[in-house]
Image (cartoon, grey):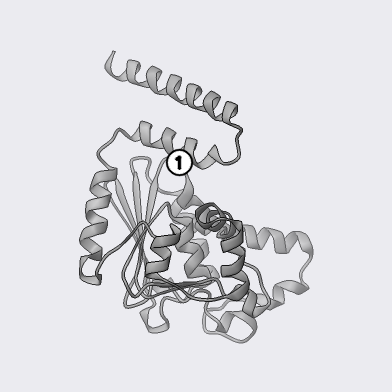
Amino acid sequence: MTDLGLRLTVDGPVARVVLDRPEVRNAQTPGMWRALAEFGTALPADVRVVVVSGEGPSFSAGLDRRLIMGENDQGEEPLLSLGAKPTAEVYELIATFQAGFSWLRRPEIISIAAVQGHAVRAGFQLALACDLRVVTPDARFSMRETALGLVPDLGGTQPLVQLVGYSRALEICATTRWVEAAEAKELGLANIVVPAEELADTVKDLTEALLTPLPGAIRETKALLLGAADRSYADQLKAEREAQERRLKELLAAFG
């Protein structure tokens, strides 16, 4: 995948996604999104943690701006030309782009974004697609789609609201302002802020901690938490009962 600007690897229970276009601050392309979706679909069943990072000083500057309206060297259709296509075709294309991000929220894996430098537009949404975010003090987030007359459409709106609330999410998107690392930590966008030289080791330690519990318990717990905001309290209690019953049966089958 190096020709697409991605390094995708699997090492036992840990998969790694590295955006590898440092010369353009890891700007993304639809080809990268399609490759990410394929990687997620083909992920071995024993993978439990996925680490997403960017090569060089930036996580990702978002969609490569050359792909928005003009000619480019990626062999990609300009984004604005999609507006001339039939509605159903536009929906289908955007759904394929979204699939490159949405698999990171599957219950059977926990995803970690290791963010340094810029995380802008699609870069911000990629970080939001992950369950956890470990960032360096120079990390800067911005949802700048509205400045281009567009909307965030890669799955970032829901997790942003879940993390910071509707009012703050609207303010971040509508003003397109920068959210620096310290504020990201305060708002709940970042789980932890660490010096750049400690980023790799911190992510490694977190990965090892996440691999300690039994995978079935983590899978069920993540599913419970992902759906909690959409359920009533009574429905959440019911979901907990059902999840626990499944775990008890699985444990009995494994150790009984």
Judge whether 124 appears above or below 75 on screen. above
Q: Residue at x 68, y 58 (%)?
A: 92
Q: Residue furthest top?
A: 256
Give 162 or 82, whichever is nearer the viewer.
Answer: 162
How far from the left and from the top, in percent, is residue 58?
37, 76
How far from the left and from the top, in percent, is residue 209?
25, 45
Left or right: where 256 falls relative to 145: left
Q: Residue at x 39, y 23 (%)?
A: 247
Please rate how many residues cluster around mark 1, counting C-alpha atoms within 10 Å: few if below 14, some from 14 to 19, many from 20: some
Give 174 or 217, whichever is nearer the viewer.
Answer: 174
Q: Quadrant of the C terminus?
A: top left
- Which residue corresponds to mark 1? 107
How far from the left and from the top, in percent, is residue 12?
26, 46
Residue 39's quadrant in the figure? bottom left
Asked which secondary structure carries label 1, the reply is: loop
How far from the left and from the top, in percent, is residue 87?
78, 63
Q: Residue at x 63, y 57 (%)?
A: 95
Q: Residue furthest bottom?
A: 71
Say if residue 129 shows up in the picture: yes
Q: Amino acid at mark 1?
A: Pro
Q: Quadrant of the N terminus?
A: bottom left
Give 121 or 97, whichever is nearer the viewer.
Answer: 121
Tally of marks:
1
Judge whether 209 appears above or below 72 on screen. above
Q: Residue at x 54, y 52 (%)?
A: 162
Residue 89's quadrant in the figure? bottom right
Judge whether 230 appears above or below 156 on screen. above
Say if residue 1 shows up in the picture: no
Give 249 or 36, whichever is nearer the viewer.
Answer: 249
